[in-house]
Amino acid sequence: MLWRAISEDQPGPKWAGLFAEYWPDYKRWWLKEGEGVRPTYAQSRAALATHMPEIVPLYENLCELAGGSDHAARFLSFYRPPPYLAGCSQAIWPGKEPVLVRNYDYNPNAFDSLLLKTRWQGRRVIGTSDGLWGLVDGMNDAGLAVSLTFGGRRVVGDGFGVPLILRYVLQTCETAQDAGAALARIPTHMSYNVTVLDAKRNYLTAMMGPDRPAMITHAAVATNHQETVEWISHARFTSTVERERYLLQRLTLHRDPQDKFIDAFLKPPLYSTAFSAGFGTLYTAVYRPRKLEMEIRWPGTIWPMSMDDFQEGGRRVQIPGAA
């Protein structure tokens, strides 16, 4: 898998080039259920203006860079996209210098493999791209870090794809409390768990769903279910309960030191190679919000980045089990 790290302060030719490269595949995915199933441009823009008005100017700028087509603008709204599932484990190690650690479990053929550093609307953000302006995890210059996992429910509703919600949080929020308020009010089209850690060591996990109010919890661990397991076959396949228990034991009974805790994400039961069955672990991310530093890790490899020293470039990595 080829990863790239790209920095561009304002939306410009680098982002436009990425969109041109990725758009054919994203367009096929976005239209796979038929164009009529997707919201119109007017509906999409109105939803953004209602729920995330601060980033509407940024959205319009990106639409122009994407060529201004109707399909591209509707896709970039992330409003009521096709359903998609992921695995993932995430947890907060609450030491003196707390860290947010996560495994992203997904199909390698449907992944951007891209780290982005931006300064859109004056806010510096680094993170792992999804949909070219959404994020599956990331951190801003206020020292706010966020990460998502699938919530393990089949319900699909009227809301946004959660990667755009993470982008919005990092563009507009500075504290875990700010992020919790945003996550509680923005509708999501599927169920997700979003874990947040800020520079003052405050953290929370929002359990979001399209059919019920978000639950804002003080959970330090999130896998692929919410309060209870609702999708039993998915829970068995992903071992979501076992992974949650394992992480809770690492944080409570064993009280692992930071390095040992992070290393556990690169081994079973957290690390998955089940790509033949749909998805496995593509990477481990480590966010250190007080230091404004992050790392992408694979077995035997660490790729460090920071807000002040973000080096553009590429990494070709071998993902165990991902042919």
Image (cartoon, rainbow, N blue to C red):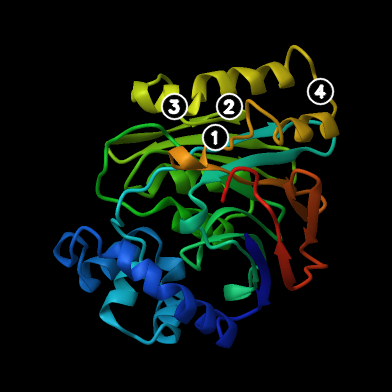
Q: 182 left or right of 258?
A: left
Sequence-first disc among 2 and 3: 2
Of residues 7 and 124, the one nearer the viewer is 7
For disc 1, the marked residue is 205
Secondary structure of the residue carrying numbered label 2: loop
Q: The residue under label 2 is which amino acid type?
A: Ala
Q: The residue under label 4 is which amino acid type?
A: Asp
Secondary structure of the residue carrying numbered label 1: strand
Which percent across, then down, holds residue 182?
A: 47, 49
Question: In this rendering, is residue 175 above or below 256?
Answer: below
Residue 140 in which image quadrant: bottom right
Sequence-first disc among 1 and 4: 1
Question: In this rendering, is residue 265 above or below 118?
Answer: above
Secondary structure of the residue carrying numbered label 4: loop
Q: Which mark is residue 237?
A: 3
Q: Neighbour class for label 3 at 10 Å: few (<14), some, many (≥20)?
A: few
Q: Which quadrant of the rendered structure holds the N terminus?
A: bottom right
